[in-house]
Image (cartoon, helix red, strand yellow):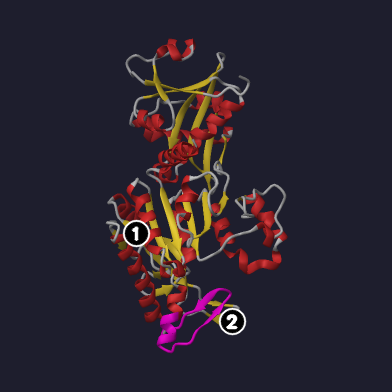
Amino acid sequence: MDQVETIREVFQYLRQFTGTTFVIKVEYPIIQDTLFPVLMRDVAFLHQVGIRIILVPGAKERIDEILKDYHIEGKTIRGIRVTSHEAMPFIKMAAFDVANRVMTSLAASSINAVIGNWVRARAIGVVDGTDFQSAGTVDRVLTEGLRRVLEDGFVPILPCIGWNSTGRPYNISSNELAVVTAARIGAEKLFFLTAGTVFRASEFTVPEGVPIAPGGRISNFSLADLERFFQLNQDKEEQLELLRMARRACESGVERVHILDGRMEGALLSEIFSNLGSGTMVYSNRYAGIRPMKPTEIIDVLRLMKPFVERGILLPRSEETLAETYQDYIVFEIDDAIHACAALHLYPEGVGEIAGVAVDEQYTHLGVGPKLIGYLLEKAQELGLKRVFVLTVATVDWFLKLGFEEADLSAIPEKKRAAYDLRRRSRILIKELKNEST
């Protein structure tokens, strides 16, 4: 029975993650490890089941080797390599050598990969009197080109090199590159595959309530728990660098960041397809940016809905209607601008209607629509509703994927049946809610 439950668990996660994007940062010692081909077969499996993979190989140790071979001295300050103009060609050589090794290993599993220059960088410059020369920081990621590569079925590989607008190369942190890429592309998960980093409760002061897995591994942190953890472990700054990167990713919109020992066979698949996992996960509030609508935002919401009304996807709404029902609406906000909305209208029969779902098309890649629906379903559950329904003419498949089922007119409240527009012929979908009292 345990084996059957494991299979069910895997299928549950496969259904959840198919079509999503994972960014995986791999440290160089793992690429040198004898089990690296096994890891790449696991990555190939993820690609083959429909998960979009972006790989960011670390090259720190390989860069050290190359610079030593060519008798080029260097130094590192606060974890940043001071990169001389003399060293830069050799750093590029090392970074692309590592990227080629990864591509070759994927080819052995019949996976097509491509190494590209989708990263724009700028100089770090002079900091506290130190000129970091050709060391850079990520300025932007060319997400449109990266998405085209993913849609064409390739695995993009991003070396730790970025270029400015004039073509000058900079040595950039592969950890930073992974974080920024995951955030800009709207990845559901970011993985740091390390050469042995494991956060054990015995080595830190752990806040009360943080889950500890069998064997003493810290299983996961919410962002709030992580802040308390940082405060309690200020004497261990160097050991916390990856956790700080994880926090940065979550604060930039990545829902889940996983840090695990990439030298353990099967660690990646175990982390993805089992509830127990194998590493330490940092997670954000999945509903960050979602909040109730304010009456002052009626014009903004109508403007957001307008293109969907013009295409016949949404019914038109007036300012007066929204003024009466704005309390039913939630909005998704970034930088004080509204980019999505949805409503939950209540009926006396213990039934709710999800309506007015609109997402700015520039933000659909962030998974905002499913988050809005998830938020409203949780709200409906809290209100004790028996079911929710939706009327739609263009998004049936989308709602089916979210767990709704098709139904007929008898499934919706009498008041809604009386107002049903036979000419529009909207499809009816429902979702039954679990009643905790039964």
Q: Is residue 407 visible?
A: yes
Image quadrant assignment for residue 33: bottom left
Q: Which element carries disc 1, helix, strand or loop? A: strand
Q: Position of residue 367 (x, y in %)?
A: 45, 42
Alpha-carbon distance for marks 2 and 1?
Answer: 37 Å
Give the amino acid type for the residue marked by disc 2 in the picture: Gly
Give the amino acid type for the residue marked by disc 1 in the picture: Pro
Q: Is residue 358 magenta?
A: no
- How busy is the neighbourhood of tag 1: few (under 14 within 10 Å), some, or many (20 plus)? many
Count of numbered labels shown in the rendering: 2
Magenta segment, which residues?
65-86
Q: Position of residue 199 (x, y in %)?
A: 61, 59
Q: Is residue 77 magenta?
A: yes
Q: Which residue bears the numbered disc 2?
A: 129
Sequence-first disc among 2 and 1? 2
- How busy is the neighbourhood of tag 2: few (under 14 within 10 Å), some, or many (20 plus)? few
Q: Which element carries disc 2, helix, strand or loop? A: loop
In the displayed structure, 139 sits above or below 69; it is: above
Q: Which residue bears the numbered disc 1?
A: 156
Image quadrant assignment for residue 67: bottom left
Q: Nearer the viewer, residue 384 or 437?
A: 437
